[in-house]
Image (cartoon, rainbow, N blue to C red):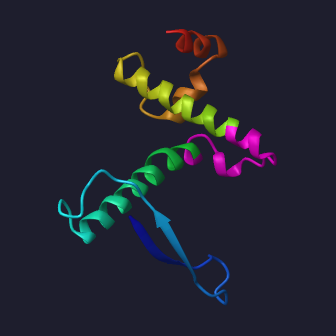
Amino acid sequence: MAVQRERTALGTPAAPATVEIGYYATSLTHNEVTDQELLQIVRDHWAAIENGSHYRRDMSLGEDASRVGKRTAAQILAALRNLTIGMYELEKERGRTKTKELKAWCRRLTPSQALKLLSN
């Protein structure tokens, strides 16, 4: 499936919009869903990513404030942030933490506790 969209850069009102085409793979056939339903699936997918992982990595772990210049270092830090979120969610699901917020949980976690969680 291909989705065509117009993109306007923020902060530059004089800049013309550019046309982008995004390609998506799905196991759904054209007979199973309408074009509008398929577009909604794509929007929901990206909304879940933005509101789930990206928002949490930025608001709880300060990702956007990071000024790491090397791409590989930034990728490693993103992976560590994802690992942190995953460890927190597992601890919540297992009932091992009463902390309601990721940021508060991170402040209380010691390096030895983190290593112990990774070995479980």
Give the left or right position of residue 58, taking residue 98 as reference.
right
Residue 104: x and y, percent? 53, 31
Q: Residue at x 58, y 12 (%)?
A: 113
Residue 26: x and y, percent? 34, 53
Q: Determine whether 90 is above or below 9 in the image.
A: above
Give the left or right position of residue 23, taking residue 60 as reference.
left
Residue 73 seen in this snapshot = yes
Compare residues 118 and 106 and report the one nearer the observer: 118
In the rendered image, the quadrant that contains the N terminus is bottom left
Q: Quadrant of residue 115?
A: top right
Q: Residue at x 64, y 87 (%)?
A: 13
Q: Determine whether 41 is above or below 118 in the image.
A: below
Residue 98 seen in this snapshot = no
Residue 35: x and y, percent? 27, 70
Please tell me how many numbered marks the rendered image carries. Answer: 0
Name the residue furthest right.
69
Q: Which residues are magenta?
A: 58-75
Q: Residue at x 55, y 9 (%)?
A: 119
Q: Determine whether 53 is above or below 85 in the image.
A: below
Q: Residue at x 39, y 54 (%)?
A: 25
74 part of magenta stretch: yes
91 part of magenta stretch: no
Give the left or right position of residue 20, taking residue 69 as reference.
left
